[in-house]
Amino acid sequence: MATQNLSMPPKKNRLNNIEAFFTDIPKKILLKKFDIPKGISEMETKNKLKHILKKNIPFDEAPSFLGGSVKPHYVPAVVKAIVNRSEFFTSYTPYQPEFSQGILHVLFEYQSMIAELTGMDTINISTYDSATALGEAALMSSRITKKNRFIIPANISWEKKTVLRNYVNNLGMEIQELRYQDDGLVDISELNTKDVAGVYIENPNFFGIFDTRLDEIRETTENTILIVGINPLGLALMRPPNEYGADIIIGEGQGLGNHLNLGGSLLGIFGCKKNHVRMMPGKIVGATHDKNGKRAYCMTLQTREQHIRREKATSNICSNEALCAVGATVYLALLGGLGLQELAITNMERANHLAALLKKYGFSFPFKKQFFNDFVAISPINSKKLNDALLKRKFQGGLILKNWFPELGESFLFGVTEMHSIELINGFAEEIHEILQTIEKT
Amino acid sequence: MKEERYQMAYYPELLLNELGTNEEMDNSRNPLPVSLQRKTLKLPTLPESEIVRHYTHLSQMNYGIDTGIYPLGSCTMKYNPKISEEIANWDVVTQVHPYQDDTTIQGSLQIMFELEKLLCVITGMDAFTLQPAAGAHGELLGMLIAQAYHKENGERRDEVIISDSAHGTNPASAKMAGYTVIEIPSHEGVVDLDALRSVLSSKTAAFMLTNPNTLGIFEKDILEISSEVKKAGALLYYDGANMNAIMGKARPGDMGFDIVHLNLHKTFAAPHGGGGPGAGPVGVRKDFKKFLPIPRIRRDKKYFFSYAHPKSLGKISQFYGNFPVLLKAYIYIIMNGGDGLTKITERAVHNANYMLDRLKNSSYLIPFGKKRMHEFVASAINLKREKGIRALDIAKRLMDYGFHAPTIYFPLIVNEALMIEPTETETKKSLDDYIDALIKISKEEPSIVKTAPHHTSFQRIDEVEATKNAIHNWKEIARLSVSK
Ligand SMILES: Cc1ncc(COP(=O)(O)O)c(C=O)c1O
């Protein structure tokens, strides 16, 4: 049976002639043939999908050490159990708060926990991903300052750059890139913020490096909007961006209880200081009370949004990534502050462990600074060759940077998390060692 | 009929920080230099069992399509097949990294490749991208494509026309793509051709339209509309939020649309997730293909991501789109098949008309004739005049019967609008119960209706106070003047 759960047609005659409903469609364009194969049963569907998807090689079968904004993290069973509760995932955006207190309450906790981590006051319930969050942040900085120049480090991901351009290009905004220094940090020494709408800085940055110049950042961006790109896990150790002058924060929340999913269903984190909240994009949950004085939650400041303000809205965003925010909330609840800190330390230690091994096997390290769970290392052999050889040995190597950072030669961005046990890292490094030796011999 | 026997669960649930304890931050093992270390981190600690209870309680104070009918007009809240959830939770789906080598994601690539083709067939377009993460995101991409197209032709066109019945994302997206928005009034619920002609010019970049429109009325003049738009050298953009009304019956491509977005979380049965993730794939005619985001998905024995497309706009999302949502749409399409999808359309339209038919002789007004596709808009204007009952009150009162409200106050051109879209997955009984409740409410004591809901976890929630309070996190909760 293909079409499930359809209602039975009522017996009323005038409704029985289905074709009558479609007479407004001009005859000329009525579809004669719908060229989609006939339906199949649920069992056949499942078998077909099994057959197709077994051509994917998941993390367990070929562990990856790919760096970047999205990484494998363990998703606790509790997170899955809660996120898979259909009361949550089969609900719509909570426009009727009396029927949706559950998810509104969760999202208020989400906002609260990200606010605690980042030191911002108001967090929206998500943007599509961290790249679109950057685009929205640039637009927001321009709304606040009425200026059009936006400054970014040259060393952010190419994906963020291209998405950013698509968000701002047609609105007369101009993007200016700041080169990075020899230590891998963005060069802010000549930063001039005159006529600048906003400055974007990542901490830790795309190369995984912690920025140590917090006072300097605060001082040089004092007269403009400072947007800090955060890693929520890194913030378990690191001073929150409000302490060095951030007005807006963005980040990727996928690592908080969400799977890799081929980089789909990400969680764009977006927050700001209270004074800018009316310029903010996206949906916000606020606390209030019901008629009987019980504390309650609802979506708030909706006059910023498209369904009310239309073209004058702060953004076009409507559907977002709320369920990923639910996952992040349960995840943070499970770990608590101490657990998150512990996890961050583990991530950092594991990354350092791999780096040390790679150093032993002849990799060089262009940047000498302390890094979090991503780092850049330059391979003694062609990076593509190394990755291909690793793949044969059931490993995904690091992310090859050559296309975007040719000056870094045969460099990789490695990403290491708690999913990479010490044994796994040792095994990976051992394979690399062997590959290098075989190549040396030939 | 459920009537007042319905009672939503209620738990006096505190916030997590009120339930748990805050442990002191221990920086003794923090590898960062002291000057970089954070000093406090107030994320509470709770036992796992308490966390599960907390969120289970909260879920029980939330209404989803699995709980009952959810006829939000324009939102297409249909039942989401469980098999899709099961498959989307497989490791071969969840444990796959976006930067993995193409040869290790052949399954995902095949699904995306085939889904693009299926969506082409369903819409009559020549090519699709799956990258946009939601409908509005697709609209933005569509408008960027329009910009790129006109620019390539050496034309400066900076106006986008929308109808006054358009969804708010249409004008917002056009604006974000740098356009000036021109709104035209509709006539009798459909596009007024004269009004359209009067604003079409060499400055018009595109006309954004959904068909059937947000009133649920099929734009009969669609072929004239499209030829007028073309004559002006402008593009026709299709907001596919209402595709559930025509799938298998008609295609935007055949109507003359140049760029189309679909909401896979509506027509294609991916759950809405309490607000997302969704997916808003964009389809285009041949001429616009070159502008689509990279990577494109290609096949040459094996499937691969292809990046060498110099005219491409680049990216609109960080990676390739919301894969789990794409997967669910794919499953839905192949499981139902062409025959099933057509039946779905018929039943969706049938259900809406059945409800409409039953509402005709009630106190609800049905503006603009009586024929609709998959949804219709009723007006509570009479009830407001006679009894002071607003659409909002009716929406709240419906909850006392255990039903979710329709979309209210949209489209903006209908006063006290109740926009009802039952979808195909409701039974006759479910439709009857809903209409019975609507009619009953119209006859109820206004004092009961205006103070509704009475049987939900919470009674009417003060949204004005939320704006005034501006309490957006638990640190600020002390400012709330009420108890827990
Ligand atoms: C008619 C219409 N257009 C566009 C949208 C926007 O879609 P999304 O919420 O996926 O961004 C919606 C849904 O809210 C809609 O109903």
Image (spheres, coloured by chain):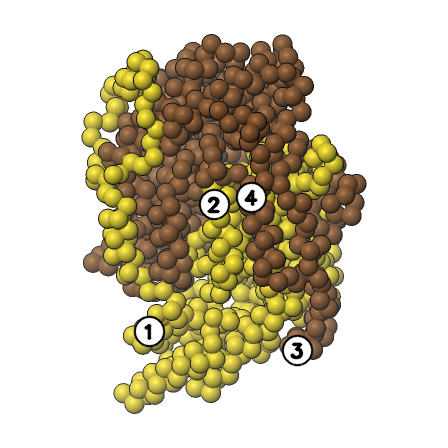
Chain colours: A yellow, B brown
Give the number of the mark in front: 1 or 4.
4
Task: Residue B102: give x, y in percent of width and height.
Answer: 32, 62
Say which residue label 4 marks: B60
Amino acid type, residue under disc 1 in the picture? Lys
Label 4: how many Cα within 10 Å (few below 14, some 14–19, many 20+): many
Q: B474 or A164: nearer the eye?
A: B474
Q: Count residues near mark 3 (Cα–Cα under 10 Å), then give few for <14, some for 14-19, many for 20+.
A: few
Q: Along the horizontal axis of the image, is B79 left or right of B460?
A: left
On residue A86, the disc is 2
Q: Residue at x 47, y 67 (%)?
A: A67
Q: Quadrant of the C terminus of chain B?
A: top right
Q: Dots 2 and 4: beta carbons under 8 Å? A: no
Query: Label 1, on which residue?
Result: A394
* Residue position for label 3: B29
Q: Nearer the viewer, mark 3 or mark 2?
A: 2
Distance from the alpha carbon under mark 3 to that under mark 2: 40 Å
The amino acid at mark 4 is Gln
Q: Residue furthest front?
A: B5
Nearer the viewer's eye, disc 3 or disc 4? 4
The answer to which of B292 and A116 lies nearer the viewer is: A116
